[in-house]
């Protein structure tokens, strides 16, 4: 069984998380670390994928600035999306050569881990054919956008736990006109920490990992790793 190290970062800016991802991707390519799953929460930010369209951002820079929303172009797939407080963001850094050299299967696996996590809370979620992400009926509850370099993944998913959905009004989410939803809107009031813990377990099951949880991850911090 392969190992995957969980890194819980709490609330972190998008730029800091991106820098950490880039560092860990380089280390993973060199075989210095096992696969990783970063679990975190962002301050308000809109990100644009490499195939995105600026017309799907419905506010100009001045309006976004007044609303306290940062903007980042990225190298992930997909269009525009929003991250913010109350949303569980996951960045898996996985060497697909050790699992399956199949990007589609990887994305389906991430979707499955989210679907199983939601099922544990009594939410019946599913896929919609030809649309990436996780849906409850016609409402999107989780977005997925990934980047693959030499078979190592980065970027990942965003699950709306208790997200303020009004912030999605600044964009056309993922370039689609379908509405978004959250666990809270569906009547499930769970903490981000609890959902994070449960998702790590299901991620491990889907990808056949032994999960290692690291309590502290920043340079100079004391590290304590345990199995879960």
Image (cartoon, grey):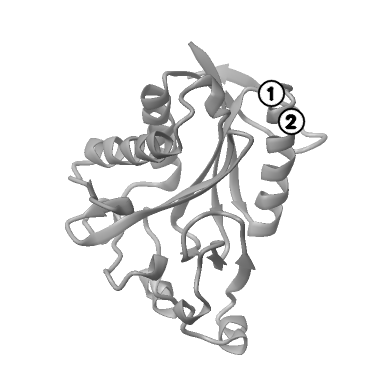
Q: Residue at x 39, y 47 (%)?
A: 191
Q: Are marks 1 and 2 in contact (CB under 8 Å)?
A: yes
Q: Residue at x 30, y 73 (%)?
A: 177
Mark 1 → mark 2, Cα distance in angstroms: 6 Å
Left or right: where 91 falls relative to 178: right
Say which element carries label 1. Answer: loop
Name the residue tied to disc 2: 27
Placement of 182 over or under 207, stated as above or below? below
In the image, 218 versus 28, the foreground residue is 28
In the image, 175 versus 102, the foreground residue is 102
Placement of 102 over or under 225, stated as above or below? below
Name the residue tied to disc 1: 33
Classify 10 Å Cα crowding around label 2: few (below 14), some (14-19), many (20 and above): some
Locate residue 164: give its quadrant.
bottom left
Left or right: where 83 falls relative to 14: left
Left or right: where 132 falls relative to 152: left
Number of marks present in the image shown: 2
């Amino acid at each position: 069984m392969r190992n995957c190290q969980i890194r819980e970062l709490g609330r972190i800016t998008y730029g800091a998380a991106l820098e950490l991802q880039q560092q860990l991707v380089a280390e993973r390519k060199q075989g210095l670390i096992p696969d990783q799953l970063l679990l975190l929460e962002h301050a308000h930010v809109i990100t644009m994928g490499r195939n995105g369209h600026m017309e799907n951002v419905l506010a100009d820079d001045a309006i976004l600035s007044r609303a306290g929303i940062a903007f980042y172009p990225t190298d992930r797939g997909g269009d525009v999306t929003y991250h913010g407080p109350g949303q569980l963001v996951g960045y898996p850094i996985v060497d697909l050569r050790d699992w399956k050299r199949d990007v589609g299967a990887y994305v389906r696996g991430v979707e499955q881990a989210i679907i199983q996590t939601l099922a544990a809370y009594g939410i019946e979620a599913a896929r919609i054919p030809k649309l990436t992400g996780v849906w409850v009926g016609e409402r999107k509850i989780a977005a997925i956008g990934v980047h693959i370099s030499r078979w190592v993944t980065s970027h990942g998913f965003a699950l709306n736990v208790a997200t303020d959905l009004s912030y999605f009004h600044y964009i056309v989410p993922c370039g689609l006109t379908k509405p978004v939803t959250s666990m809270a809107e569906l009547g499930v009031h769970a903490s981000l920490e609890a959902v994070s813990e449960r998702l790590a377990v299901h991620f491990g099951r889907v990808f056949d990992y032994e999960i290692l949880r690291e309590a502290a991850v920043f340079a100079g911090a004391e590290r304590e790793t345990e199995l879960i």
